[in-house]
Structures are given as C-alpha cells and as structure tokens.
C-alpha cells in the first residue's frame, strides 16, 4: 500500500477490526451494485470512499429531476445522463483510485449470473421484486454474499444473505406470496430514509469483505423513521424454499 493510500484510509486502518489487512482486502475487492437510485447512491459513495478496489455499477435509467430529492450521487447538471455515467463522475471525484465499470442495461439470465460470479459481494439497491428474486437466485447459485435493502415512505429494511447452503436466502423471507408491489413514485419516500438504509448496506458490505464484526446474517433490521425505532427480526431458512433448498 502506497503512502497516499495509507493517508487516505488512515482513519479506517486505525480501527483494530479493520487494520492494514482489512484495508488490503477492500482494495482487492470487486462489488456489484444493482441500482444507482436512493439506496445505491450512498452505498456506492461510501464504498468508493472506503477503498473498495472495483465497483460495477448497473442501471438502465437516466437521471430525472424527481430523483434529486434522495439520489445524492446525482446532481442537477446530471439530468438526462445515464445514471451509471452520472454516478461514475461523482465517484471519480470522491476516489479516483476506485476502478468503475458501468453497465447501462438490465442484467438478466446468464449475463447477470456471470457478473455476480465475478463479484465478491452484491449490493441489491433495486426497486422491484423481479430483480431482487433474480439477484437472490444468482447469489445462491454462485454463493456470493448479497446485501439487500429496501425503503418506502418512512420505513426501511436491510439484511445480509450469505448465499451459502444452510443460511436463509431472500426467497425464504418472502416466498411466493408477494403483496401488490409498492413504489416510491406512487407512495413517496423520506430522503434520509434511503440514505440510512444505503449507508447500512455499505457498512455491512465492508464488514463482510473484511471479516469485521457480526454481519446481519439471519437477521432483518427494520426502521420506522416516523417514530425513529428499530426492530431486529430473526430469519430462518425455509425448508421448502425453491431457491436455496431446491
């Protein structure tokens, strides 16, 4: 590690749970981020700042004025740009050492599994169940850790799914009985809520990549921002899950 890197990451290296070895692990890591919206924005910014060596950004949307209330990686000048390009510009300003790869299309099937297999960890910052289920299947198939986050109105949730046999997966949590999907465009969302959840996703990613602390494996952390209360629910593997038990 060079002198400039030691200085840049010094406050993180000082942490005994991270240290020099943990920082080296981050520098050698590749993280796949699906969605550069409200959750993906803070997650990507903190991971780049923390020294993750490679970030693969996936989003097929363009920056819209209505995004700017909560998607803090984008600026007014970015309106009309593909979100991955806008995000790359911001991340390059935060940490030019971070290698950024942009995928400006929806990943499905083999292409999705291929990118998941190349990654050390997945950040699910998507906004629909179809994408979440597909990411979960790829996570289980490749045994790649998945950091899942969601937020709407004044509520949010986050969990870590390891992708390894015996541990619960995202499908164990939701099964086949999904209620009518709700979106921020229809229900609204408080800007800091996505920031809180996305930041926790980044923190959990750093813990998993470095081996620090105890990740949210087998736990679902739920935020009620209106009352500013947290709940932690224990998750168990579904013996009938078609994904991790199939």
Image (cartoon, rainbow, N blue to C red):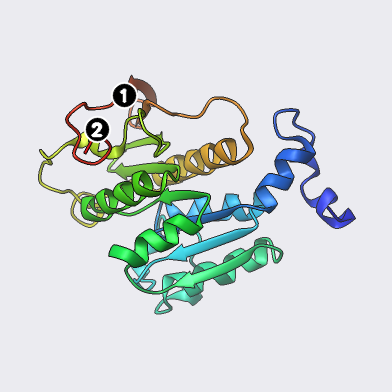
Which residue is at a point 66% across and 61% down the rendered structure image?
A: 94
* Side (left or right) of 41 relative to 63: right
Say which of 243 and 32 sits in front: 243
Q: Quadrant of residue 241?
A: top left
SS assignment at label 1: loop
Measuring from the top left, give residue 229's x and y in whole percent. Answer: 37, 23
Residue matched to label 2: 173
* Side (left or right) of 2 relative to 198: right
The reply to whether discs 1 and 2 touch (Cβ–Cβ < 8 Å) is yes
Which residue is at a point 53% across and 44% down the rendered structure image?
A: 202
SS assignment at label 2: helix
- Quadrant for the C terminus, please: top left
* Side (left or right) of 45 relative to 126: right
Which numbered circle lies on residue 205? none
Q: Is residue 230 above or below residue 37?
A: above
Which residue is at a point 10% across and 38% down the rendered structure image?
A: 177
Which residue is at a point 12% across and 40% down the rendered structure image?
A: 176
Residue matched to label 1: 235
């Amino acid at each position: 590690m060079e002198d400039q890197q030691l200085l840049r990451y010094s406050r993180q290296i000082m942490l005994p749970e991270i240290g020099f070895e943990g920082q080296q692990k981050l520098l050698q890591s590749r993280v796949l981020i699906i969605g550069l919206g409200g959750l993906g924005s803070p997650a990507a910014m903190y991971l780049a700042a923390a020294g993750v060596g490679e970030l693969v950004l996936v989003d097929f949307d363009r920056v819209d004025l209505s995004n700017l209330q909560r998607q803090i990686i984008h600026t007014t000048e970015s309106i009309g740009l593909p979100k991955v390009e806008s995000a790359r510009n911001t991340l390059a300003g935060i940490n030019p050492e971070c290698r950024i790869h942009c995928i400006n299309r929806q990943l499905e099937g083999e292409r999705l599994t291929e990118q998941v297999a190349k990654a050390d960890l997945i950040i699910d910052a998507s906004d629909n169940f179809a994408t979440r289920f597909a990411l979960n299947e790829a996570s289980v198939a490749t045994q790649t850790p998945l950091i899942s986050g969601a937020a709407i109105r004044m509520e949010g949730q986050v969990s870590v799914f390891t992708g390894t046999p015996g541990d619960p997966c995202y499908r164990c949590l939701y099964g086949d009985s999904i209620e009518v999907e709700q979106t921020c465009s229809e229900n609204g969302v408080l800007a800091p809520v996505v920031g809180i959840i996305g930041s926790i996703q980044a923190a959990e990613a750093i813990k998993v990549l470095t081996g620090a602390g105890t990740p949210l494996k087998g736990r679902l952390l739920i935020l009620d921002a209106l009352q500013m209360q947290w709940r932690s629910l224990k998750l168990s593997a579904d013996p009938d899950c078609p994904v991790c038990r199939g």
